Image (cartoon, rainbow, N blue to C red):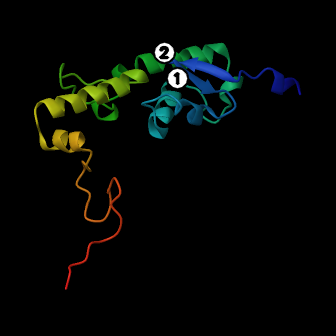
Amino acid sequence: MAQEEDIKYFVRISNSDLDGTKQVKVALTGIKGVGRHTAGVITHLASVNGHDIMGRLKDEDVDRLRAVVENYTERVPAWMVNRPKDVYTGESRHIFGTDLSTALDEDINLMRKIRCYRGIRHETGQKVRGQRTKSTGRTGTTVGVKRKKE
């Protein structure tokens, strides 16, 4: 019972509340922009065991995790970041948290503004990545298939 009481149920890293009852690798995926592979890299760079429970980590370990998340772009190769060549600055960077959704919205607005194919598809609410639309992706009251009158 003594071990269960000293657990921190919320650990704050990169403006995100992480679940303290999960393993470190799994809990880090609660940060927007961090997947399973990135979480493994972060735990390796911070020299923290990824299978430990997040709420039972010492404060020094959590501080090392925070430092690695803040300096992630400088410590990994360019192919490991989620924004390898920024449209505006041209540099590679990894975006976390609310900045990720803001950047995505900016990208979609840029595509709409320059009237590229993907931007037009976003505007009209159609599928963007080349999926077929004959039978799926229908909106509104469209049901079934229209037959020719004989």
State which tag comes first along the sequence, 1 or 2: 1
Give the residue displayed 64% in from the left and 36% down from the top: 51
Give the residue displayed 25% in from the left and 77% down from the top: 147
Residue under pointer 1:
46
Where residue 148 sits in the image (x, y, percent)? 20, 79
Give the side of residue 75 with respect to residue 150, left or right: right
Where does the N terminus fall, quadrant-wise?
Answer: top right
Where does the C terminus fall, quadrant-wise?
Answer: bottom left
CA neighbours of label 1 inside 10 A, class few (<14), some (14 to 19), many (20+) = some
Q: Quadrant of residue 55?
A: top right
* Tag 1 secondary structure: loop
Dots 1 and 2: beta carbons under 8 Å? yes
Where residue 23 sits in the image (x, y, percent)? 64, 34
Q: Nearer the viewer, residue 91 or 138?
A: 138
* Tag 2 secondary structure: helix
Give the residue displayed 35% in from the left and 22% down from the top: 73
Residue 130 can be seen, yes or no? yes
Looking at the picture, which amino acid does disc 2 mark?
Ala
In the rendered view, would you say 109 is above or below 142? above
CA neighbours of label 2 inside 10 A, class few (<14), some (14 to 19), many (20+) = some
Give the side of residue 125 with respect to residue 16, left or right: left
Q: Nearer the viewer, mark 1 or mark 2?
A: 2
> How far apart are the two marked residues, 1 and 2, measured between alpha carbons?
8 Å
Q: Residue furthest right?
A: 1
Mark seen at residue 27: none
Q: Quadrant of residue 8?
A: top right
